[in-house]
Structures are given as structure tokens and as C-alpha cells.
Amino acid sequence: VLNLWRFMATKEAPIHPNIKKALVDGDEKQTTLVMRSVRNTERVYKNNAAKQVREIEQKKPGDFMAFRHLVRGENYRKSFQETGDAESSVWSCGQSMALIDDVPTCKQLVETIVKDAERVMTKRLAGMIVSKL
């Protein structure tokens, strides 16, 4: 699941470049939790729309209809597919966005993930690997 956000910031991802830029520019503090009052908590990109949802939830806890207009999927779609406005919709985003610093191709990303995993296994975990030979 953590890699989902990483693959959103690839050249092939059918997402507006401005959303990809928001992922690259963001850090682990750029997320917040919404919809807690309706027991459907979601971690989202911290933006104006998410702040409005949190404010409404404080004033009217549990009243989904009060903030429904802000969390509609259509808003999300418009931001990601049409406008590229990272501030106008509530969209899922994990803290792992802090690890995103570029927009590679999927091939480049997978190659990097494999190289990083190999490095960790051979350098950091070498002492833990016991040969059966």
C-alpha cells in the first residue's frame, strides 16, 4: 500500500502533473485525518478542502451531510484528471509521500526499488543471512 503513492508519481500515471508535483513537494507532515466523526477515518493530503472538513466535523460531529460536498469522488476526479488543483478536493495520501522526490517512469521506479532492496539485504542484513551450504 505504501508504494501506491509512489506509483501515482510516475510518468505513466494518468494523473495531472500538478498533483504529481504536490506529491514530490510534500512531506510526512502534509497529511491529515478526516471523517473520524463518522467512523470512516481516512488519511488525506492536507489542503484547504481537508481543513474545511475538519472544521465542519468539529462543529457538527457525525453529520456526514454537512461535509459531503467536500469529500465527493467527483471533486477528487476533477483535481486528478482535469484541473490539477491539489487544494480543491479531499484526496487520499499517505505519509510515505515524504519519500517521493521525483517522477520517474514505472520501469525506472521498479529498478530503483529492486536495487534498494538488494542493497539493504546485502549490506544491512548480511549478518542475519545464514548459508545452508
Image: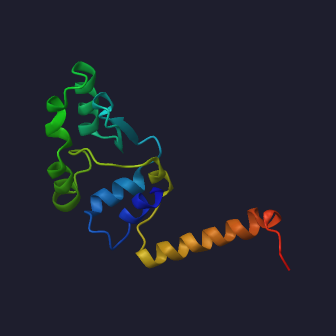
Locate residue 90: give its quadrant.
Answer: top left
Residue drawn 23% across and 58% down? 80
Toward the front, the furthest residue is 132
Closer to the camera in the image, 43 or 17: 43
x and y percent of residue 96 in the render? 48, 52
Residue drawn 74% across and 70% down? 122
Residue drawn 25% across and 22% down? 61
Toward the right, the furthest residue is 133
**In what quadrant of the picture does the C terminus appear?**
bottom right
Locate residue 127: give its quadrant.
Answer: bottom right
Closer to the camera in the image, 101 or 92: 92
Locate residue 72: give its quadrant.
Answer: top left
x and y percent of residue 62 in the render? 24, 25
- In screen coordinates, is 84 left or right of 9? left
Residue drawn 80% across and 63% down? 128
- In this rendering, the answer to whether 45 lies above or below 2 is above
- In this rendering, the answer to whether 38 lies above or below 28 is above
- In this rendering, the answer to whether 108 lies above or below 27 is below
- In screen coordinates, is 26 left or right of 73? right
